[in-house]
Image (cartoon, rainbow, N blue to C red):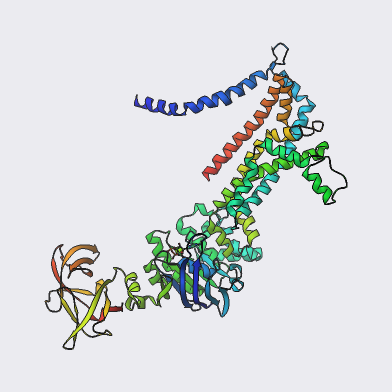
Amino acid sequence: MKNFIKKFESYAFVSPLLVFVALFVLIPIIGSIWTSMFRDVTFLKMKFIFLDNYGDLLRDEGFWKSLRFTLLFIAVTVPLELIIGTAFAVVLDLKIPFRGLLRACVLVPWAIPSAISAKIWELVYNYSYGLANYILLSTGLSEAPVNWIGTDIGAFTTVVVADVWKTAPFVALLVLAGLQSVPSDLRLQAKIDRANFVQTFFLITLPLLKPVLLVSLLFRTIDSLRVFDVIYVLTHGGPGGATTSVSLYAYKYFLGGDFGYGSAISVLLFLVAFVMSVFYIKVSKFQDNL
Amino acid sequence: MKIEIKNIQKEFKTIGKESVSVLKDINLEMKDGEFFVLLGPSGCGKSTLLNIIAGLENPTGGQLIFDGEVVASENKSECMPPKERNVAMVFQTYALYPHLSVYENIAFPLKIAKMDKSEIDRQVRKSAEILHITNHIDSKPSELSGGERQRVAIARAIVRKPRVLLFDEPLSNLDAQLRTATRIELKKLQRELGITTVYVTHDQVEAMTLGDRVAVLKDGYVQQVDSAINLYEKPANKFVAGFIGFPNMNLFDVEVSKEQEKFYIQFEKDRFYFDPAAVEVGTKYCMGIRPADIEVTDDNENVLKGKIDTMELLGKEVLLYVSSNNMEFSIFTAKKNFKENQEINFRFDQSKIHFFKK
Ligand SMILES: Nc1ncnc2c1ncn2[C@@H]1O[C@H](COP(=O)(O)OP(=O)(O)OP(=O)(O)O)[C@@H](O)[C@H]1O
Ligand SMILES: [Mg+2]
């Protein structure tokens, strides 16, 4: 009896959270999976079609294009974020004046909501009065203003820059915490062993940061998989769908009233993210055991 | 290599706080091949001085000289970085690189020195052999015991034949037995290598057994530099007298008087006559006598009378805590059937009394 109460008690404590998770996470997921098996288009009769939406999806060139874009986006932004974030962290870890203030400043881009930071970048890249073109013209690097968002490459670049600007600080924060957990003795020892700053970084510090970097890598990859707001604000997925991410692609179907098809896309995206999350949890558990 | 430390000062400045002067005026000279120990209570600046020798800190005053060459002074441009000093150091925490194997740890300084592979291999194996860690050469530091880690750290320190070996309390993380064993080995190793060694500790037993000479540090000054036996027998001041030796020396304030050519010390009740030493009548002294230099006697002449408060049995000997003349004495003597609250008479070995000017 006592045992039972004990057990019950522990469930009672977690139950509010369980209710929230069920309400806001579990039910929508199951709902999406459910919806994805229907022809559910506004003004049309709902019809159970089982996996037909998925079949269409696999034959949908637009979907593949958005998937290709998303993967390319991840392949470019995540390494950039890791490298820049790590570089920032190393600088912020040095004994430099105003270190506290600098640390706070670096975090600002991350603290700004992405929709707003995307708006800021929109101003920067504006064709007629943007900062980017102003700099290009006034330094004479270019004769005429560049239509940043109008070309495939240009649009891709603007999106990448905006995203890296926003999330590199996040990586910097993680890596900085990792750097601070490297015992100071080790760096002193490396000094005594006559290693210079660069050798110490690459031979001692960086290998010790491996777990943190791996976590950042997975975390950023999963997050970038569902990239939406930056692109939505900056390019709307254009030009000609060149910067349409998978989630933006799904969103367009929802907007068009095709909930079944949109849900199918979301579910596929969810599956990929889910697999990666499981991997992430495995890795972080593995890390705890180290 | 000979190390000269001349008027070294170190002040730590922290923004918004008063600066702390840790080393005020340190003067020391370490001979070539000497095993030199820095001994002092916690926080007296031993590690700071060691770090200055290593080049991890710069002094705020004075000079550090290696074989006649200035390697550090208050003048930043004269401070040689650790890279160029060729010193090796063993930290209290051993500071082994956790991601590298024992082999790679020992090889690290050689790899940095760009030695060629086969030579590195030879040197690493030789060092590992000297320290009996050949069996563990492929292990990671996390797989080793404290004693083994410590050996790896020492192997890494000696592998590149440094000019100076620096140790910062390397034995304090080991258990008592291992500490004693390692102490003996370390001493032997240093003899064989003949490398000038500076060893920091707050443990007087370590200092006494290891050091050719020992410097006692306190309050930013060197209190005394001497061989272990001289520190024990001829402490230069009250602090050294109290710090060195177990059980601790009895120290109390006295005034020497003279009556008909006989010197004596007047305690509250008893009076103790002694042969004149280098003392002046009428001066206040701090008198020191080691517990082992007090004799319990049945005599009634020229003795102090006291009562045993408590006692500790230490093998064949016993340490008595005796109250007498409103003071506390500790007496270390052969075991007899002493009892608590027993009244005893005792006297000081006259040749072993120390007088420190106040
Ligand atoms: N970087 C620093 N900034 C300010 N104060 C410091 C700094 N390093 C050391 N100190 C101070 O200098 C004093 C001496 O420190 P040090 O580490 O040299 O002592 P120690 O003799 O090695 O003591 P222990 O036996 O505990 O290791 C301490 O009071 C410490 O607080
Ligand atoms: Mg210390």
- Quarter of the image with the N terminus of chain B is bottom right
Q: Nearer the viewer, residue B265 or B31?
A: B265
Q: Nearer the viewer, residue B89 or B78?
A: B78
Tell me which residue sits at (60%, 46%) in the image: A173
Q: Position of residue A204 (x, y in %)?
A: 60, 56
Tell me which residue sits at (82%, 52%) in the image: A139
Which of the 4 quarters of the picture holds residue B301? bottom left
Classify residue B98 as left or right of residue A271. left
Relative to A237, does residue A98 appear above or below in the rendering?
A: below
Question: Can the viewer see residue B180?
Answer: yes
Residue projecting furthest to the top: A45
Q: Position of residue A147 (x, y in %)?
A: 83, 39
Relative to A202, does residue A111 appear above or below in the rendering?
A: above
Q: Nearer the viewer, residue B134 or A13?
A: A13
Classify residue A151 as left or right of residue B47. right
Residue projecting furthest to the left: B300
Question: Can the viewer see residue A78?
Answer: no
Quadrant where ligand 2 appears: bottom left
Q: Position of residue B273 (x, y in %)?
A: 18, 81
Relative to B89, does residue B222 appear above or below in the rendering?
A: below
